[in-house]
Amino acid sequence: MRALVIGCGRVGSTVAKHLTADGWEVAVIDERAEALERLGERWEGRFIVGHGMDTRVLLEAGIEDADAVVVATDGDNTNLVIGQVAQRRFAVDFVVVRVLDPARAALYSELGLNTISPTARAIDELTEWVRSRARPRAQT
C-alpha cells in the first residue's frame, strides 16, 4: 500500500511514521526541508520539498499510485484544495483532510471529502467529560 502525506508537522510526521511502521510505502511533502528531521534519522520513505498544491510536486511524490492521501498542513484552505485535487483530479480512492474549522469540515464532509476536525473532536470530548464526570458542589 502506498500513502502520500502532505504536511510534515506534528500530525503529518506522526501519521507518516505510523503508516511506515504498518508496512506502507510513504512519501511526505513539506515546504520546509528541515521538516524531514521530524521523521527521524531512520526514515526510509520518500521526502519531497515543495508545496502540496503544485501538481509537479504531487506527481513527483507518486500521487498517481497512491492508495491514500493524508493532508495535514497548517492551513485549512490549503488542505481543502489539495484534498479535492487528490480526490477529483487524481482519483485517489481514499483522501482524508485535517480541517481546524468545524463548520468548514462539516460542509466539505457533506460534499464528499473525508475531513477530520480536531477542534470539533476536542469540543465534543471536553463537553462529554464535563457532562459525565463533573459533580455538583455540596450546598452549605
Image (cartoon, helix red, strand yellow):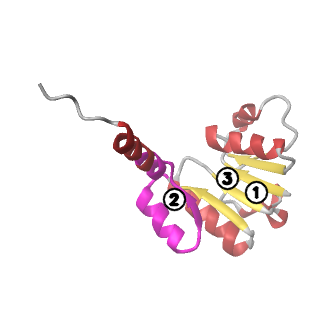
In the picture, measured across the screen, residue 32 lies left or right of residue 116, that is: right
Q: Residues within 10 Å of mark 2 (few under 14, many from 20)?
A: few
Q: Nearer the viewer, residue 115 or 56?
A: 115
Provide the secondary structure element on which disc 3 rests. Answer: loop
Say which residue label 3 marks: 51
Work out which quarter of the rendered image holds the N terminus and state it: bottom right
- Please, is residue 54 above or below residue 72 in the view? below
| Cα–Cα gap, marks 2 and 3 | 13 Å
Q: Nearer the viewer, residue 123 or 24?
A: 123
- Residue at the location (86% across, 31% down)? 42
Range drawn in magenta? 100-123
Say what amino acid the circle numbered 3 marks.
His
What is the quadrant of residue 35 in the picture? top right
Residues marked 3 and 1 touching at CB (< 8 Å): yes
Q: Which mark is residue 57?
A: 1
- Residue at the location (11% across, 25% down)? 140
Q: Which mark is residue 77?
A: 2
| Cα–Cα gap, marks 1 and 2 | 18 Å
